[in-house]
Image (spheres, helix red, strand yellow):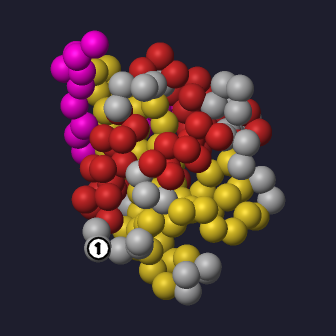
Amino acid sequence: MGDGGMRIRRGRREDLQYLPSILMKAYEGLEEYGERDIDRARKYIDELYEEDPECFFVAEENGEIVGFIFCNRFWYSKFEHSQVGAIHEIVVLPSHRHEGIGKKLIERAMEELKPSKIELWVGEGNKDAIKFYEKLGFKRKEKAGKWVRMIKD
C-alpha cells in the first residue's frame, strides 16, 4: 500500500470539528484512557488547541483527516522541574494504523519541539502505544495512577 496521497499539515481551527469522532474511534477498547462522550471529547480538543495552536498537526489522506497530534512547546514539567516539549494527544484512526502515520505525526511534532526534552503520558494498559513510543526513542519514567510518563532527550 502506498501512502495514498497522505500528507501532514499544520492544523487549523476549522479542523477541530472533525476530531472528536476520530478521538472516540481511536479509544475504542481503551475507553478508560479516553473521553467519556463526544461532548467531553470536543471540550478536550478545544482546550488542547488553545494551549498552543501552532503545535497542532493533522494527517490527511485524500483530503480526509485520519490522524492528529497536539503538542505544547511551553509545558512546565513538574517531574523535570523545567520547561519541556509535551505531546498531549496523538491519534490515528484504527482503519489507518500501521501505515506509518503516527510516526510521521510524531516526527513533525518533534521538529516543532526541538531542542527541548519531550514528555508524554500514556495509559499503562496501552501496550501498543508504549511499544510505538519506545521505538521512537522514548524511555519509561514514573507511573501516576494508570498513566506512565515517558521522556525523550
Residue appearing at x 25%, y 37% in the figure: 8
Residue appearing at x 48%, y 36% in the figure: 91
* Residue type indicated by callout 1: Pro
User: 104 left or right of 17?
Assistant: left
Residue marked by disc 1: 115
Image location of residue 126, percent across then percent down: 66, 40
Image location of residue 88, percent across then percent down: 51, 55
- Between 87 and 127, which is closer to the camera in this rendering? 127
Image location of residue 13, percent across then percent down: 34, 42
How crowded pointer 1 is (Cα within 10 Å; few <14, some 14-19, many 20+) is rated as: few
Image location of residue 39, percent across then percent down: 64, 34
Looking at the figure, which quarter contains the N terminus? top left
| Element class at badge 1 | loop
When the figure is inspected, residue 33 is found, relative to residue 92, above or below; the finding is: below
Residue appearing at x 67%, y 58% in the figure: 148
When the figure is inspected, residue 52 is found, relative to residue 89, above or below; the finding is: below
Which residue ends up furthest to the bottom in the rendered image?
A: 81
Q: Is residue 49 visible?
A: no
Q: Magenta segment, which residues?
A: 1-20
When the figure is inspected, residue 65 is found, relative to residue 86, above or below; the finding is: above
